[in-house]
Amino acid sequence: MTNLRVTARAHTNIALVKYWGKADTDLIIPQNGSLSLTLDHFYTDTTVEFDSKLTTDQFILDGESKSPVKITNFLNIVRQKAGINSFAKVDSVNHVPSTAGLASSASAYAALAAAASKASGLNLSHKELSKLARRGSGSASRSIYGGFVEWIKGYNDDTSYAVPIEEDLDWKIGMIVAMVNSDKKKISSRTGMQTVVNTSPFYSAWVESIDDDLRNIKVAIKNRDFKTMGEIAESNAMRMHALNLSSSPHFNYFEPLSIEIMDTVEDIRTNEQIECYYTVDAGPNIKILCQQKDADDLLSKLRVRFPQIQFSFTKPGPGIKYLN
């Protein structure tokens, strides 16, 4: 096999209807479906080259050599599909803080899936890429596509994958990201969600509520009903975090500033009549859904109130791209 050196770019996504809990921890089959918005501001570029001269996989992240254990586990799936046994050099640059609740694993494994599969000689469809990316991180299945994306939960490796709802958005919306803390979170997503699945007495009610959220938010997207979409996203996120508080041992990802920002968003929405809604993943950072026409006004108000916080506005982003 001729060595191919392939670079792929994948953007992160933020779930508006959350995935929180696995039905199969090995294959990463979720307990429920989910729906996300891919963002243009945060992304990962990953280069993969399989080389028969290598005696082990090499992993470089942001210029530093890292343990390749997780990468090797993922590349083993690619090698099996491609029928090769060469080790690979993986060089990844993350333009999103890792393990801070900004879905860095989504863009990371989507980019790795795309680059590694092509470098191994595979020519996978987007559907097959979504299945492959899912094996590294569930949310990575959605980062194969741009715009609004739904992850169909499925029940095995072949039936659990993401599909695009609307990729090339003409809807002038976006997200403000409030970077409360970019440090590594104290409880990983995998540990947190498994604790919830195993111990929360409210988990079955969460799963039952998701079908309504998915159905209603897709109608809102189709109708360009920003208010309904925002309300669903906000309530879905709060129900997810309520599960964390109801688990044993209980835990949460919020910091005091997270709660202050959420309160401020509610205040702006109620008292200043600007439509804006927050969502929060497994981390302290707040994402605020808004319309592009309101972004500058919202940013100004938030920066005055929280001068110590870094705020950035991001528009809907694209799906997977090959850079060579």
Image (cartoon, grey):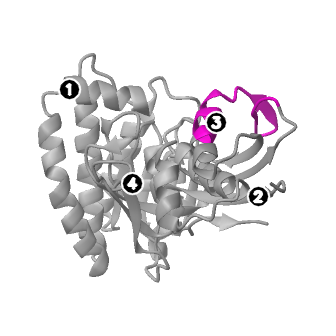
What numbered label is drawn on residue 179?
none
CA–CA distance in space, label 4 to label 3: 24 Å
Q: Amino acid at mark 3?
A: Ile
Q: Secondary structure at mark 3?
A: helix
Q: Amino acid at mark 2?
A: Val
- Relative placement, left or right, of 77 versus 150 is right
Front: mark 4 or 3: 3
Q: Secondary structure at mark 2?
A: strand
Residue position for label 4: 15
What numbered label is drawn on residue 246?
1
The residue lying toward the viewer, choosing from 122 and 5, is: 122
CA–CA distance in space, label 3 to label 1: 33 Å
Residue drawn at point x = 31 percent, y = 72 percent: 226
Q: Secondary structure at mark 1?
A: helix
What numbered label is drawn on residue 6?
2
Residue drawn at point x = 26 percent, y = 81 percent: 223
The residue lying toward the viewer, choosing from 300 and 293, is: 293
Residue 171 x, y percent position in the rendering? 43, 80
Residue 203 x, y percent position in the rendering? 17, 35
Front: mark 2 or 1: 2
Q: Which comes sooner in the sequence, label 1 or label 4?
A: 4
Q: Which comes sooner in the sequence, label 3 or label 1?
A: 3
Tell me the crowding category of disc 3: few under 14, some 14 to 19, or many 20 or more residues within 10 angstroms, Cα based: some
Magenta-colored span: 55-76
